[in-house]
Amino acid sequence: METRLIFVIGSPRSGSTLLQRMLSSHSAIFSCPEPHILTPLAHLGYYNTVDKAPYDHLRAVDAIRGFVAHLPHKEADYIDACRAYTDILYSRRLQASEKKYFLDKTPAYALILDFMVKLYPRSRYVVLTRHPIAIFSSFANSFFDGDYYAAQNFNPILNRYVPAIARFLREKPVPLVQVLYEKLVRNPAEEMETILAFLGLPFEESVVEYGKQRHEDKGLGDPVAVSRHYRPMTKSVEKWVVELLSDDKKFEFMRDIIDSLDPMDLKTWGYPYDTIFEPLLSAGLSTKKLKQPPIDRFQLERKLLLRCNIHTNAFGRVVKKNPLLL
C-alpha cells in the first residue's frame, strides 16, 4: 500500500481542497474528504504527544514505551503495527474505487510529518504552499468574520505550519514535490504536468477541468468554494492585498506575525521575506474596501463549531475544544 499512497501536505486555507480535486480527477487517483486517519495514531502516547485524552496519558506513555522496548525490533515493530492498521483502511477504501492510487489530504498531517516519514517513507508527497498572508486572511475571514486577533488567538496557523512544512521541504526525507498555489491557479496545466510527472502518471486534461468530474463533498475540507468553478480561478490570489490596504491595523498585525517567522522558513516556503509585501506596493495606495462574499454552508458549519468551544469527552465531562483539530 505504501507505494500507492499520495499525501497532499499543506496548511489550512492553502488551497489543498482545490489541489485534491484536481489530482483526484485523474483516472488513476482516488480521494475522499479529509479522513484524519494518521493524526490519532501519532498521538496515541508512544511519542509523548497526548495532552488530552479520556485516560491517563502519562501512564500510557510509560506503559506503551515499556511494552515496545521488549518487542524484537522495538520501535520498528510499533511502526509496523501502525502501518498494518492504516494499510487495511486505505487499501479497502481504494478497492471500492477501482483506481490505483489513494490520495489523502488532511492539513493536520503537516504537524505530524516526523511520524509520517517513519510510517510511509516510500509514499509520495505533494507539498502545497501559498502566500502566508493569503492563508491567514482566508482563515480569519472564513471562520472569524475577519477578526485577525481572534483568529491568531485561537490558532496561530502561520507560526505552527510554516516552520513545520519548511523544515520538511529543506530536509526532503521522503519523495516530494512542491507546488505554489499562485502558480497552480495561474498555470494549472503546466503545474499539473510537473506534479503528475513526479507521480509517474501521464497528464490528463480532466485534472484542469476538475469540475466536470464527480467528487465526494460530504466531510471535512472546503468543497463549497472549489465547487463554484469547473477549473482553477485566480480571483483569490491577491484578495488579501485589498483587505490590508483598507485596514492599517490588519497590516500592522500581519507585519508582526511575518516578522516573528524565520526568514529561512519563508524562503523555503517559496515567499522570501523581502518580497512578502510586494503585492501591496504594486497595488498602490488603493482605498477600495474589500467586499465580503456571502457566507456559504462550509463557513457556517465551521463558525458554529468554533463558537461551540466545548464538548464532552467519553466520560461525559465537559472539556475545552482542542484547537489542534483545525
Image: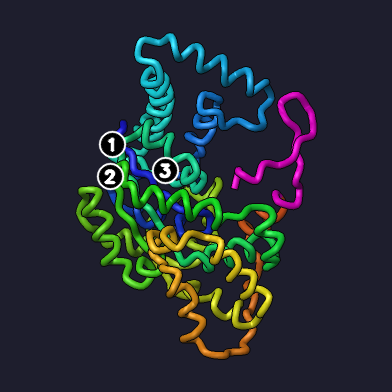
* Residue 142, x across and y down, in percent: 63, 62
**Residue toward you, 201 or 42:** 42
Q: How dense is the environment of label 1, judged by Cα within 10 Å: few (below 14), some, or many (20 and up)?
A: some
* Residue drawn 60% across the image and 30% down it: 50
Q: Name the residue under label 1.
A: 122
Q: Distance between the residues labelled 1 and 2?
A: 7 Å
Residue 290 to residue 21: above or below: below
Residue 108 to residue 88: above or below: below
* Residue drawn 42% across the image and 49% down it: 9
CB of mark 1 within 8 Å of CB of mark 2?
Answer: yes
Q: Distance between the residues labelled 2 and 3?
A: 15 Å
Q: What numbered label is drawn on residue 175? A: 2
Question: Is 177 displayed left or right of 157 in the figure?
Answer: left
**Residue toward you, 297 or 128:** 128
**Residue toward you, 299 or 288:** 288
Residue 319 magenta-highlighted:
yes
Q: Which of marks 3 and 1 is in front?
A: 1
Q: How many marks?
A: 3
Q: How dense is the environment of label 3, judged by Cα within 10 Å: few (below 14), some, or many (20 and up)?
A: many
Colouring used for the render: rainbow
Query: Which portion, as a residue range, is magenta?
Result: 305-326
* Residue 173, x across and y down, in percent: 32, 42
Q: How far apart are marks 3 and 1 (CA)?
A: 15 Å
Q: What residue type is labelled 3?
A: Asp
Q: Name the residue under label 3.
A: 104
- Which of the two discs, 1 and 2, labels the residue nearer the N terminus? 1
